[in-house]
Image: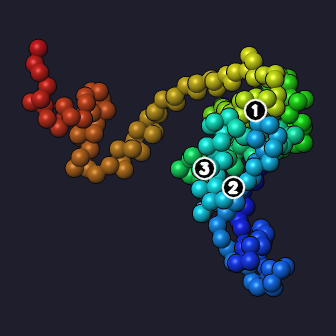
Amino acid sequence: MSVYRKYTCPCGYWKRSPGKCQKCDKPLESSGWGYQFRDEYGSRKTGTARTKVDAQRAMARHIDKGKLKPTSATLVGLIVEYIELVSSKHSDGGSRIRSSLKHIEKYFKSQRIQTVQNRDILGYIGNRNTEGAAAGSIQKEITLLKSAWKFAKRNNLVEHDPFIDVSIPSPPQQPMRPVSLEDEERLWKELPASSLPYYQFIAYTGCRMTEALNPSSTSKK
């Protein structure tokens, strides 16, 4: 699966890079974008679009209809293809999901899709925990892995599911450090003297700011 720029000549000749026509020696001109993929039967299909985003969206529509067949044999290659196809659906062009790819690529390298097992996914999570990655970052990476895997499974590229019983434990909540007397004194010194009593009143009483600004709004019991 790929998206590419097209350079054409009036005589009908075209290629994916600029240059001269091999038939009439005229300079080739950019004429939009092309895309190609293999359908669910393994047949190669091509199409054209005005912009790169249009080409990506056209391929994404084939994904939604289940007509696109992944061609990569490696897990990383599958994810690269998946990101390329769904990036047009994201407002940032897929930059956020691409940021997760470098960690996946570093760990799985050239591992083939059919060899990925539950232990590999758990091993990846353990490795990222050892590296000190945040739980939120690991969650995004596993979500990307799962999405690409569903894409491959929907197109009959794989049958097994290596994500069974895979979960990411939430990091332990760190207790909040109480404010020390030194911190309190430093805070009071930073505030204007004219409004210091107001802030101290709120801090020491727990009164809401709206109530402190408008005492008459507080109902009397």
Position of residue 124 measured from the top left corner of the image (x, y, whole percent)? 81, 31
Q: Nearer the viewer, residue 183 or 164?
A: 164
Residue 197, by quadrant, is top left
Residue picked out by circle 2: 47
Q: Is residue 143 visible?
A: yes
Q: Is residue 120 visible?
A: no
Q: In the figure, is residue 6 to the left or right of 193?
A: right
| Mark sitting earlier along the chain (3/2) | 2
Q: Residue at x 21, y 34 (%)?
A: 210
Q: Residue furthest top?
A: 221
Label 2 amino acid? Gly
Packing grade of label 2 (10 A; few <14, some 14-19, many >=20) is few
- Residue 155 is tagged as 1
Q: In the figure, is residue 218 to the left or right of 91?
A: left
Label 1 amino acid? Asn
Q: Secondary structure at mark 3?
A: helix
